[in-house]
């Protein structure tokens, strides 16, 4: 398998310059792209650095296990429910709840699909659609949600209201908009109130309609510029996700399925409770983040990508009609080969958003939500693994407890870590194509941002955004001297900062 | 006469030291009774996002409260206008983006909005609010109590100009 790792480490660093793209704040989330050039200004080395959950696994050590489903939500402001549910699933095993009651499982699923819907809506309408609607090099003052609102007001409005609907689903099932307590080890702590169910159901069909429109929009954009969309940041890789036990798309529970870059199965529906037999992580000296890979293939050949682009192709079908019709069209577009285009993440993400809306509607019609047994327990265990498909990809929570029910060890592998190698590859392709000469251009910055946005990496979540400067681009020569730099401030203005 | 509907939106991660200033502000402010003629709705969230525009619907006046790495102690208070900003992640937006989203969603201008930025210095995981941040929080809450005494946009604008020396209309 011809995996593209050639640019990660240059054969020699002699006579090369470095381009660094470096968000200023380390705490809010630290991303950095370094590009090492040779003497002929060709790209030899590209690396993406992101600081993610620094210290969180240590932070939870010594805490009683029942605190975890609430505590871990503070990992991420975008997908707190994913962490809430992954932790609860891991702790189900600890309390011996190998099978939840129908009420508990359906409420958790409803919560999860509310999370998927709101996160995908935020990503597409707020973050990605300005790039896609206006073009990657359009003026920044236009390429934002305000620009979308001005020229496509219906798109902007539906984006906000879809997101809000998902948040309401979360509030109804988790108890609160943030730091919900709905999922507890062994089940859930309350049923859904009938009036809340009826309120959500009244809007559910409209949301499905809007999601179908969103899929149509992203398809239209893709078809309008097929050459660019198919090639931008594209790379071939293995793929990993959960699939349901019948091979269907299931973002809440299932077994691990991996395919190679040609779409051939590597393993299928593997019990994730021993995930380490399939996946292991490599540490590299230049990155805070680990690099997971499929153990059987080794670090050079075994890296993979996760998330919507993978999930829509990794499953055999989607169990809701509109989304499955869209999945079939998506797969057909690949002409019998897996689609590896980075920008196709957006198309796949909208198919998943439609799936989430359909699932929510179906679940809301199920009266099991309204009452019944909420919690089960059984023989206790000291170790639990919970895996869920979070909006950005596979999320693994693994806890080991001591005799006092305190967390002794925790291991979390988040979607962004799974996609670490993949994001590096996408940026390498972009850098090779758009970097030219010794000047850090705004165009280069724009295109690298577009590639990063497709994955929407999770960053460590402190949110003191006021006054922050999100991104800086720096060109450093072989001797370490900065020859050019470009900074993008929080208000979108760009400042060149040559020494 | 209908009461002035004031919407206070604060955000931050309480597990990351001074980043929790926003939620801490709400926790203390919502325990205080509304003055006559004012009805306050408090929203505390982990991150500020475009859908908070929906929380502003029906409001006459809005206040955004957040920790800031750059604000001058004990706090900064200023007017916010609909903004045009871009970011490379979905991890939070600026208050001006929420105002822009309001316009897009409801097809009318958002309510007059102001921002209370409380300086923080330590944002590490697992840390509580620092002593200096707690002091700034006390001052910000006292200032908020004064603000609620006159909830006309003009009075708040004058307060912003008095504190920051800004000219009218400048964010």
Image (tube, helix red, strand yellow):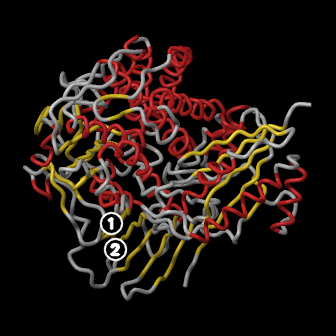
How busy is the neighbourhood of tag 2: few (under 14 within 10 Å), some, or many (20 plus)?
many
User: Front-most of A257 and A413?
Assistant: A413
Please state the horizontal and vertical placement of residue B127, each as a whole percent of the image. 46, 64
Q: N-terminal of the two: label 2 or label 1? A: 2
Which element type, helix, strand or loop, lies under badge 1? strand
Of badges 2 and 1, nearer the viewer stands 1
Q: CA distance from mark 2 to mark 1?
A: 9 Å
**Is A202 positioned to the left or the right of B82 in the image?**
left
Query: In the rendered image, which residue does mark 2 sit on?
Result: A36
**Label 1 is found on which chain of the structure?**
A
Q: Quadrant of residue B7?
A: top right
Position of residue A496 relative to residue A93, above or below, is below
**Is A425 positioned to the left or the right of A78 in the image?**
left
User: Front-most of B135 and A46?
Assistant: B135
Q: Quadrant of residue A299?
A: bottom left
- Residue at 15% x, 44% y is A275
**Label 2 is found on which chain of the structure?**
A
Please state the horizontal and vertical placement of residue A125, each as a whole percent of the image. 54, 38
Please state the horizontal and vertical placement of residue A1, each as a whole percent of the image. 12, 50
Query: In the rendered image, which residue does mark 1 sit on?
Result: A47
As drawn, the label of residue B66 is: none
């Amino acid at each position: 398998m011809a995996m593209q790792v050639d640019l990660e480490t240059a054969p020699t660093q002699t006579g090369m310059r470095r381009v660094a793209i470096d968000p200023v704040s380390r705490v809010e989330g630290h991303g950095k792209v370094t590009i090492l050039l040779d003497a002929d200004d060709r790209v030899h080395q590209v690396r993406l650095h992101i600081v993610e959950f620094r210290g969180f696994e240590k932070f939870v050590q010594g805490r009683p296990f029942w605190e975890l489903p609430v505590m871990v939500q503070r990992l991420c402001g975008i997908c707190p429910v994913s962490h809430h549910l992954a932790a609860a699933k891991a702790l189900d095993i600890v309390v011996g709840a190998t099978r939840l009651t129908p009420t508990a499982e359906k409420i958790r699923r409803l919560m999860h699909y509310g999370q998927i819907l709101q996160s995908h809506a935020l990503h597409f309408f707020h973050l990605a659609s300005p790039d896609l609607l206006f073009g990657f090099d359009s003026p920044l003052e236009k390429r934002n949600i305000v620009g979308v609102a001005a020229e496509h007001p219906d798109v902007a409005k539906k984006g906000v209201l879809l997101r809000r609907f998902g948040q309401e689903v979360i509030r109804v099932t988790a108890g609160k908009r943030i730091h919900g307590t709905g999922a507890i080890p062994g089940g859930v702590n309350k049923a859904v109130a009938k009036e809340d169910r009826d309120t959500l159901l009244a809007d559910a069909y409209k949301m499905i309609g809007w999601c179908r429109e969103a899929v149509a929009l992203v398809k239209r954009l893709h078809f309008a510029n097929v050459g660019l969309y198919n090639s931008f940041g594209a790379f071939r890789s293995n793929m990993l996700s959960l699939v349901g036990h019948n091979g269907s798309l299931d973002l809440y529970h299932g077994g691990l399925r991996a395919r190679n870059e040609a779409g051939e199965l590597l393993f299928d529906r593997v019990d994730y409770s021993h995930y380490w037999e399939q996946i292991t992580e490599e540490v590299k000296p230049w990155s805070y983040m680990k690099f997971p890979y499929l153990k059987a293939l080794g670090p050079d050949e075994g890296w993979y990508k996760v998330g919507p682009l993978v999930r829509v192709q990794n499953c055999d079908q989607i169990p809701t009609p509109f989304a499955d019709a869209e999945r079939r069209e998506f797969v057909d577009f690949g002409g019998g080969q897996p689609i590896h285009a980075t920008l196709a993440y957006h198309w796949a993400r909208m198919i998943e958003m439609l799936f989430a809306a359909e699932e929510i509607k179906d679940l809301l019609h199920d009266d099991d939500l309204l009452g019944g047994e909420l919690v089960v327990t059984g023989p206790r265990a000291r170790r639990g693994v919970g895996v869920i498909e979070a909006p950005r990809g596979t999320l693994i929570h693994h806890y080991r407890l001591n005799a006092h029910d305190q967390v002794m060890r925790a291991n979390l592998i988040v979607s962004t870590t799974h996609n670490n190698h993949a994001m590096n590859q996408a940026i390498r392709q972009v850098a090779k194509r758009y970097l030219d000469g010794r000047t850090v251009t705004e165009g280069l910055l724009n295109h690298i941002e577009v590639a990063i946005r497709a994955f929407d990496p999770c960053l460590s979540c402190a949110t003191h955004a006021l006054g922050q400067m999100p991104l800086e681009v720096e060109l450093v020569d072989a001797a370490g001297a900065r020859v050019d730099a470009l900074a993008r401030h929080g208000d979108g203005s760009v400042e060149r900062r040559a020494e | 006469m209908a009461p002035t509907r004031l919407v206070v939106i604060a955000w931050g991660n309480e597990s990351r030291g001074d980043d929790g200033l926003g939620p801490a502000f709400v926790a203390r402010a919502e325990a205080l009774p509304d003055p006559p003629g004012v009805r306050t709705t408090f929203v505390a969230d982990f991150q500020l996002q475009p859908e908070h525009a929906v929380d502003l619907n029906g409001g006459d006046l809005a206040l955004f409260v957040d920790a800031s790495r750059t604000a001058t102690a004990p706090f900064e208070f200023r007017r916010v206008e609909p903004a045009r900003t871009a970011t490379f992640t979905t991890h939070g937006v600026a208050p001006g983006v929420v105002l822009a989203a309001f316009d897009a969603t409801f097809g009318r201008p958002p309510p007059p909005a102001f921002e209370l930025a409380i300086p923080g210095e330590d944002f590490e995981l697992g840390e509580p609010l620092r002593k200096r941040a707690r002091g700034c929080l006390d001052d910000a809450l006292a200032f908020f109590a004064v603000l609620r005494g006159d909830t006309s946009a003009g009075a708040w604008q004058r307060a912003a100009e008095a504190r920051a020396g800004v000219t009218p209309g400048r964010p």
